[in-house]
Amino acid sequence: MSNQETVFFIWEDKEFEGVIEKEYEYSFLISVHNPTEDMVTKYTNRMIVSKKVCRIAK
């Protein structure tokens, strides 16, 4: 998986889209495209998300 690849993920029962900034062994650091206010406040628009809940945009 490469950086700057677009992925979709589920968080709190909603689907979000983002770009991979960094890959870890079991997760990704993702810059979220359509963040909620809560994401912006708590996570500053970037979240670490498990690879298990991500799918690659094609």
Image (cartoon, rainbow, N blue to C red):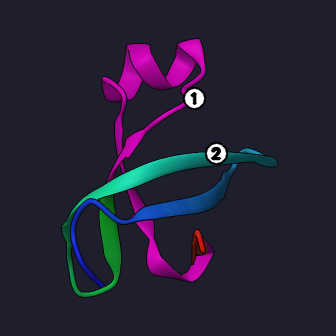
Which residue is disc 1 drawn over?
Answer: 34
**Amino acid on which disc 1 is placed:** Asn
Q: Quadrant of the C terminus?
A: bottom right
**Image spot of residue 37 (x, y percent):** 56, 12
At x 56%, y 82%, the residue is: 52
**Image spot of residue 28 (x, y percent):** 32, 67
At x 58%, y 69%, the residue is: 57
Q: Nearer the viewer, residue 17 or 46?
A: 17
Helix, strand or loop at label 2? It is: strand
Is mark 2 in CB contact (under 8 Å) with mark 1?
yes
- Mark 2 crowdedness (10 Å alpha carbons): few <14, some 14-19, many ≥20: some
Give the Cα distance between marks 2 and 1.
6 Å
Residue 22, label in figure: none
> Taking 1 as reference, is 36 left or right?
right
Q: Of label 2 and label 1, which has the lower sequence position?
A: 2
At x 46%, y 48%, the residue is: 18
- In the picture shown, does residue 9 fall above or below 38? below
